[in-house]
Image (spheres, rainbow, N blue to C red):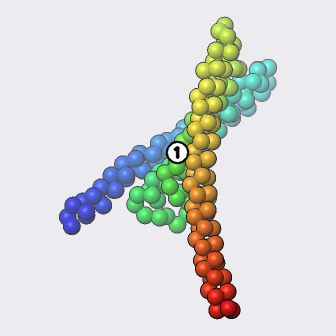
Amino acid sequence: MKVVRFIAGMRFFVLIPVIGLAIAACVLFIKGGIDIIHFMGELIIGMSEEGPEKSIIVEIVETVHLFLVGTVLFLTSFGLYQLFIQPLPLPEWVKVNNIEELELNLVGLTVVVLGVNFLSIIFEPQETDLAIYGIGYALPIAALAYFMKVRSHIRKGSNDEEEMRNIGEVTSVNSESNWLINKKGD
C-alpha cells in the first residue's frame, strides 16, 4: 500500500515543469510588453524619418511571436497540471484531455517559431542564398505536418475501430432480439 501511495505521489514532480513553464510564460509576456512599448516609442519618434516598412513588420511579428510562445507555454503548464494533478475550472478550449493535445500544441509552436525565424531572415539583407534557408526551414515543417497527419489518422483509426466494435455489438444485440421476436411469433 505504501508503494502505491509513493507512486501516486510522484505525480507531484510535474509541479516543477508546471511552475517553470508558467514563469517562462510570464517572462515572455513581460519581455513582449516591454518590446512593444519600446517599439511604439521608436515608431513615434521615427515617424518623421523615412525608414523601411519591412523592418516594422518584422518587429511587430517578432513581438507578437513572443506573446504566442508565452501563451503556448501557459497552455502547456495548465495542461500538465490538469493531466497529472487535478482538473482546473477553465473554459473548454483550455482544457487538456490527453498528452497528444500537448504534443500538437508543441508541434504547432515549433512550426510558428520556424516560420517567424524564416520571415526575419527574408527581410534581412544577406549575401547568402535564401533557398538554402528555405529548404532548411521547410523540411522540419513538412516533417512535423506529416507527423500531425499520421497522428490524427492513427487516432481516427482507433476511434473508427471502436465505433465498428460498438456497431457490431448493437447489430448482434438487435439480431438476437429479432431472433427471439421471430421465435415467439412462430
Quadrant position of the C terminus in the picture = bottom right
Residue at 56% over, 54% down? 158
Tag 1, which secondary structure?
helix
Residue 170 on image: x %, y %: 61, 73
Q: Nearer the viewer, residue 149 or 10?
A: 149
Question: Going 40% across and 47% down the picture, which residue do you hit?
Answer: 17
| 45 displayed left or right of 175 | right
Residue 46 locus on image (x, y percent): 73, 25
Residue 132 showing in the rendered view = yes
Furthest-front residue in view? 186
Residue occupying the far top of the picture: 127
Q: Residue furthest left?
A: 2
Residue 86 x %, y %: 43, 64
The quarter holding residue 12 reads bottom left
In this image, 17 relative to 102: left or right? Answer: left
Q: Which of the 4 image quadrants contains residue 105? A: top right
Q: Nearer the viewer, residue 52 or 112?
A: 112
How many marks on residues?
1
Side of 26 where 108 appears, left or right: right
Snapshot quadrant of residue 10: bottom left
Image vertical order of residue 149 relative to residue 163, above or below: above
Query: Which of the two residues, 146 or 157, is positioned nearer the viewer here?
Result: 157
Image quarter hosting the N terminus = bottom left
Measuring from the top left, give residue 28's x and y in whole percent. Answer: 53, 40
Question: Could you tell me the amino acid type at mark 1?
Answer: Glu
Q: Nearer the viewer, residue 135 or 37?
A: 135
Q: Residue at x 73, y 29 (%)?
A: 57
Q: Is residue 114 above or below residue 23?
A: above
The answer to whether residue 32 is visible is no
The residue that mark 1 highlights is 103
Q: How busy is the neighbourhood of tag 1: few (under 14 within 10 Å), some, or many (20 plus)?
A: few
Residue at point 60%, 80% (across, down)? 176
